[in-house]
Amino acid sequence: MYSSKSRPVPSKGALRVLYQLAYISSGAALGVGVLCAEERRRRTQIIQRIADNARILRQSPRCVHNAA
């Protein structure tokens, strides 16, 4: 029923290449994740700076006198 032929085994070189590809792809995925997190942090900082500037402008005496 089943043949007694053994299945082909990949060579050490092929296994090494597969290992390196897996290592590279995991590093690339991690790098993309870090870049996305840094971009999100940078944009959040910019928005916070805009909100702080708006608050400072609203509290400015020049703005308070013009509101009346």
Image: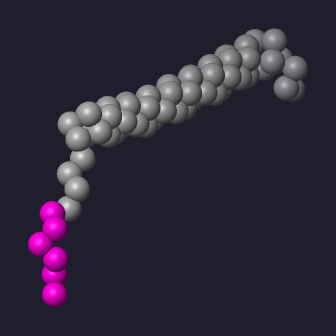
Q: Position of residue 29 (x, y in %)?
A: 43, 37
In this figure, which colouring scheme has been used for the structure? one colour
From the image, give the main secondary structure of the stretch colored magenta. Answer: loop
Question: Is residue 68 at least partly visible in the picture?
Answer: yes
- Residue 49 placed where, x, y %? 62, 19
Q: Is residue 34 visible?
A: no
Q: Is residue 4 magenta?
A: yes
Quadrant of residue 58 in the image? Answer: top right
Most distant residue in the bottom direction: 1
Numbered range of the magenta stretch: 1-6
Q: How many marks?
A: 0
Which residue does the image show at 56% across and 27% down from the upper left?
39
Please tell me which residue lies in front, 14 or 42.
14
Which residue is rendered at x = 16% and y = 77% of the image? 3
* 19 magenta-colored: no
- Residue 13: x and y, percent? 26, 33
| Up-down relation of residue 7 to residue 17 (above or below) | below
- Look at the image and tell me in which quarter the C terminus lies: top right
Q: Quadrant of residue 17?
A: top left
From this view, report whether residue 3 is shown above or below residue 26.
below
Q: Nearer the viewer, residue 56 or 46?
A: 46
Given residues 46 and 2, the one toward you in this image is: 2
The N terminus lies in which quarter of the figure? bottom left
